[in-house]
Structure formats: C-alpha cells, structure tokens
Image: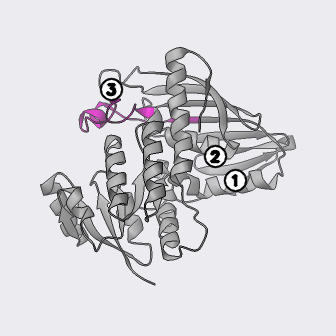
Amino acid sequence: METLNAAIIGGGAIHLCHVGALRQVPGVRLHALAEIDSEKGQALARTYGCHFYQDYRALLWDDEIDVVHICTPHHLHKAMVMEALAAGKHVFCEKPIGLDSREAAEIAGAAARAPGRLAVCYQNRLNPTSRQIMCELAGGTLGKMIGMKAVLTWSRGGRYYTHSPWRGRYATEGGSLLINQAIHTLDLMQWFGGGVARVKGVVDSGELAAVTEAEDSAMATLHFHNGARGLFYASNSYTTDAPLLLEIHCEAGMLQLRDNQLWRVCAGGRTHLISDPSPESDAKAYWGSGHLAAIRQFYQTLHHPSAPAEYTSIEEAGKSLALVEAIYHSSQTRQWITVNA
C-alpha cells in the first residue's frame, strides 16, 4: 500500500481529532502542519515530528503532500478548499463546507473540475448508533416513519466566543449555534428522514447575547419528504454538554438515542438496547465517535479509487447547510421555507 502524505491547516481544538485519527489509519503519515500563530504551530510540528508552515499557501506548493485537512474557521474554508483542489490535492474539510449555499455551489463546481477528491466531515453519520439507526430504518421492522425529534443542549460560555472572536459572527462563522454545533444534528435528521421538504423555525440569543451577534438557541418544525414531521431544539446556553437526545417514531415502535445508547422500543413497551458504543479517546464524548471512522473511510477510498466512494460528498454536505439557511430565513420572515437542497 502506498503511503500518502497528509497535511493539516489549522491548529485549533478540532485538529486534535484529525491527528489522533491519522495515527490510527494505515497508509498515511502526517507530513506538515500550517498554523498562522508561528510559535504555536512550530511547537505542534515539533510534537508531531512534521514540517511547519505559517502560510498555508506555501504548504499547498509542497509537492510531497497528497491530502490536505482543513481545520480552520468557517469563513476560510471556501478559499482554502478551492486553492487546495487547484493545487491537485485531495481535501478533507471540517464542516460546514462554506458559509452558505452559494459558497457550497462554487466549491462543488471547483471540485467537479479538479483531479482530487473532496470530503466534508460529518462524522456523526459514522457513529455506530447512527449506522444502526439507518439499518433499523432500512430493515423496516418498526414500519413507516411517522415523526422525529431531536434535542441538543450544550454549554458554551462567554470565553468560548471571546477567546476566538470569529465565533458567533455572521461574517466569519455564518451564524453560531445552528451552523456550528447543531448542523450535525440537523444533518442526521435530514439523512435519517430522507430529506426535508420545508421548515419553520426561530433562532434567538439569550444567555450569550453579550458575546455573540448570532443565536445561542433555535427550534424548528420540519416536514420531511416522506411525510413524517420533525421537531428540533438546540441551545448552547445549557449548563453542561449533554448527549444528543433523538427519537424516531414509527408505526410499530420507536428508536431512541439517549446517553449515547440506542434503544428499540416495540409495541407494548418492550425495550431493547441495540447499540452501546464507546467514544474514541481523542475526541470529546459528546462529539460522538465518528472522526476516526470518517477519516479512515476517506483514505480507504484514496487507496482504492475504483471502489464506491462512501465519504460525505460536497453534494451531501450541502443538504444540511441548506436546511440551516432555511431555518435562518424562516426566523427572519416567520414563514414556512422550502428547503432547496
């Protein structure tokens, strides 16, 4: 197996998940790191035993690099992805792929013309519980889906925003809670439900209004293409990072994700534990356990290009971004919004 050289752009918290995964994926080594903070970047590069670049463009000129991981603030994603693709690199980008659907469409056009592959990190799709939910729904043992609800309550104090001023700003984050933390939950909902047709929602800021110009809480009603109805609530102003609570109501029972465990509840109240995974050691437990699986999946495709691509594509990534946009639009207009994904 050929060894691929990987590089990471961005030395923030999320890059640790990528470093941890790259150490466990066969046929890849960390070749370089780019970080605008020179002192921080050099220290990280020494720790990892890799090359350091302060300018990410210089990293892209390194012909030894095969794959670029983009772990930077949201507003930098579009330019970095497009430049990396233009340089002939494969790209693995943290979500969201861009600030809005317009940026996503531009990136999709660039990706279609480029020789390299582009994956977007929606790692929660690869959590064992998520995969089991898809198997349960595909198997049809509980019958037709009728409804779905999800509750995500995390804690992001004022320092989270003041320490990284790009957060909570429309120009640099694209919003706040919805496009950063809750987009993973919305992605799972639209994925499990086969797509959202329309949505009506509201966003607001309460506890964190002093440190963010965007929302810290959101709720929405979703109408799925399959006829099911969804309810969604999320907030960054809770007192702790609680695990996602997700419930899928079907004709003959329901699936419940609670405390990172998946339960099947059948008619008559019979309850069965069907998935109880342990999170990977290099990720926060409430993030889920999918980073390693997502990165491994991408490299498997790069090593075996003739095999079907199973990673989250730019087209798939655009669906949750369009849903986020629709909720923002609905909150502004107080109207039902068709989701154009």
Query: Do the residues under discs 2 and 1 have CB atoms within 8 angstroms?
Result: yes
Query: Is residue 96 among what the camera can see?
Result: no
Residue at label 3? Answer: 212
Tell whether 270 sits left or right of 319.
right
Q: Percent from the top left, x then y, of residue 310?
A: 58, 62
Query: Do the residues under discs 1 and 3 have CB atoms within 8 angstroms?
Result: no
Alpha-carbon neighbours of circle 2 within 10 Å: few (<14), some, or many (≥20)? Answer: some
Amino acid type assigned to the residue bearing label 2 in the image: Trp
**Foreground of the two, 150 or 300:** 300
Report the magenta residues as a range. 151-177
Q: Percent from the top left, x then y, of residue 286?
A: 48, 48
Residue at label 1? Answer: 134
Alpha-carbon neighbours of circle 3 within 10 Å: few (<14), some, or many (≥20)? Answer: many
* Real-space CA distance between mark 1 and mark 3, rounded to the nearest whole angstrom: 36 Å
Tell whether 338 sits left or right of 93.
right
Q: Residue furthest top?
A: 334
> Secondary structure beneath disc 1?
helix
Looking at the picture, does residue 340 appear above or below residue 262?
Answer: above
Comes first in the chain, label 1 or label 3:
1
**Foreground of the two, 287 or 56:** 56
Nearest to the eye among marks 3 and 2: give it. 2
* Real-space CA distance between mark 2 and mark 1, rounded to the nearest whole angstrom: 9 Å
**Foreground of the two, 6 or 240:** 6
Q: State which quadrant residue 206 falls in.
A: top left
Colouring scheme applied when the structure was drawn: one colour
> Secondary structure beneath disc 3?
loop
Residue positioned 31% across, 61% down in the render: 8
Amino acid type assigned to the residue bearing label 1 in the image: Met
Amino acid type assigned to the residue bearing label 3 in the image: Thr
Q: Residue furthest front?
A: 113
